Image (cartoon, grey):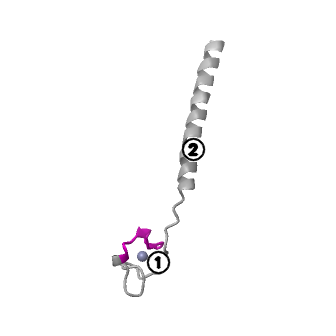
Amino acid sequence: MPWCEQCDLVLEDEEVDEEGGCPSCGGPLAEHRPSPWYFKFMVVATVIYLGYRAYQGITWVVHHAHLHL
Ligand SMILES: [Zn+2]
């Protein structure tokens, strides 16, 4: 599926102009949009990890607050 990097736009084959460029900016098209599933996966994994660490930190603080009160 053609993709315009400049417009961040995925195009249907019918939308591509005669020169094979982007219909909105006329720029060159890439054949495939790089789909960084691994990047999305890393973001999700990082969010989960940070959430887990935050949870650990909170339970640690709560636990130690109880010990010292
Ligand atoms: Zn474009």
Residues rendered magenta in the picture: 1-13
41 up-or-down from 12: above or below: above
- Mark 1 Cα within 10 Å, few/some/many (few <14, many 20+)? many
Q: Nearer the viewer, residue 46 or 1?
A: 1
Residue at image point 59% right, 39% down = 49
Residue designated by label 2:
45
For marks 2 and 1, give the CA distance.
32 Å
Q: Which of 68 and 55 is in front in this view?
A: 55
Residue at image point 58% right, 34% down = 52
Quadrant location, the C terminus: top right
Residue designated by label 1:
29
SS category of the residue bearing label 2:
helix
Residue at image point 49% right, 70% down = 32
Ligand 1 occupies quarter: bottom left
Quadrant location, the N terminus: bottom left
Q: Are marks 2 and 1 in contact (CB under 8 Å)?
A: no
Q: Residue furthest bottom?
A: 19
Under mark 1, the amino acid is Leu
27 up-or-down from 35: above or below: below
Kindly indicate the quadrant of the structure image that contains residue 12.
Answer: bottom left
Q: Residue 56 in the image: x percent, y percent? A: 61, 28
Under mark 2, the amino acid is Ala
Q: Residue 39 in the image: x percent, y percent? A: 56, 55
39 up-or-down from 1: above or below: above
Residue at image point 63% right, 24% down = 60
